Image (spheres, grey):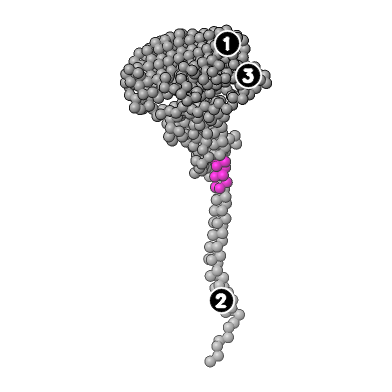
Amino acid sequence: MMAPKRTRHDARGGALIIVLLLLPILASLSVALISSSSMNLAQSSNLASMTEARLAGEGGVSFLLYEVSRCGVSGSLRGQALLNSLAAKLGAILTVSYNTEKTAITIPDISLGDGKRSFGGLITLSDPETLHLVVTGKYAAGAGASARIVQRELAIDLHPTWDPALGFGICSKGPVELGMNTDLSGVTEPSDGSIYSAAIGTLAAPAVSCGSGHISGDVSLSPPNTMASLDISGTAIDGTIRVDAPPVSMPTIDRTPYKSLATTVMSSASPPAGTYKNIRIPANTNPTFDGSVSIQGVMYVQSPNKIYFNNNCTFTGVMVADDPPAGSPDADNYIYFKNNMTFSGVEQLPATSEFANVRKLPGSSILCPGFTMEFKNNLNSVAGIMALKALIAKNNVDSTIYGSVLIYGPAGLDFKNNSDLNIQLSGSAPPAGFNGYGLAGLMPDPATYVEK
């Protein structure tokens, strides 16, 4: 039987059916293509907005790290004292808020000037040696009904860089004895007038004692001390008394910068009155200065030596001494000032070539941790840190010290009656002559940087 013959009309009908079948598919593809294009545009816009927010955050991190590094907070502080000091010093240069619980410093949003980008910050204390900085970068995306704020969060930790000992007005391995009517005060911050003693005190030999007077800062001891290790019942103490403070190690002294600067050998046992510049006193010279003297630059003392200043002495610069030989008696490593002693800082030296390198070493006045020093009558001022094995001061000492008093020996510190000691600790950098000199007070830890 013959198959029926297909006509042109039949072919047209088949094509129509195919077209009708393809139309929904093509429509779906068109919708998918339009949707994909729109989503790609939205993703691109969102990525651009996130990038702007991240860049704002990165700018905020850089800005706040700079402000923190230059605000003057001491790198010797730890724990709550560190956060308190940072809040106060940042508050002097930025608008910040410090919550009543004293757990967080908030930096309100700071505009980057274009009306779209800004950043804000939060600083908290993760542990006694870690500040945690979180910066939130913001970008105002879109306009009208589609307006929104895009945010990126960035975080980094900072650590204090130098020895906690330099955060105390007096830090001593031995006992601290303040006589009757003694006032220990911080000049700019009450906490500068603080005491730490590593001595183990008893009722008969307390770690810290003060007959009567005033202490503006904290009094801190480490265990196994107890309140019975103190004899301060007649003293007004503005700060906190702690007998469970963490142990504090004494900072390491670096004499290297000074040795080559003491270029003039002074070997006379009876030097005349006059001016001495950049001197080195050989071991066993044992000089006695009976007349008024002015010492400028570096005075480098080799051990052992007994040095007596029996009249007025004006010192501008730094006194540095070697550590005594093993077994050398304390009496053979002794420096005594009888009347009217003043230590001025290296910045007060003449701006001449002979003092050019000394002027680059600020912050320290006495670096003699193996020597006992005694002042009798009128210690006027000391322009930098004092580091000694033991310190004795007698008779109406009214002095301002611009830096910590560090006592490296078990004999400790003994200020006799009627003394006023005012202490102003240094700024945000460790002083010359100590390990860490040149480091900022707070350093960011790059390994902790994260973007969220």
Q: Along the horizontal axis of the image, is 108 left or right of 348?
A: left
Label 2, on which residue? 14
Please provide percent x and percent y for residue 58.
56, 39
Q: Nearer the viewer, mark 3 or mark 2?
A: 3
Disc 2 marks a residue whose amino acid type is Gly
Magenta stretch bounds: 46-55
Label 1 SS: loop
Label 3, on which residue? 264
Label 2 SS: helix
- Residue 52 lies within the magenta run: yes
Residue at horizontal 61 percent and vertical 10 percent from the top:
274
Residue at horizontal 48 percent and vertical 12 percent from the top:
375
Disc 1 marks a residue whose amino acid type is Ser
Disc 3 marks a residue whose amino acid type is Thr
Residue at horizontal 47 percent and vertical 36 percent from the top:
132
Label 1, on which residue? 270
- Residue at the farthest bottom position: 1
Q: Are marks 3 and 2 in contact (CB under 8 Å)?
A: no
- Is residue 142 visible from the viewing direction of this image? no
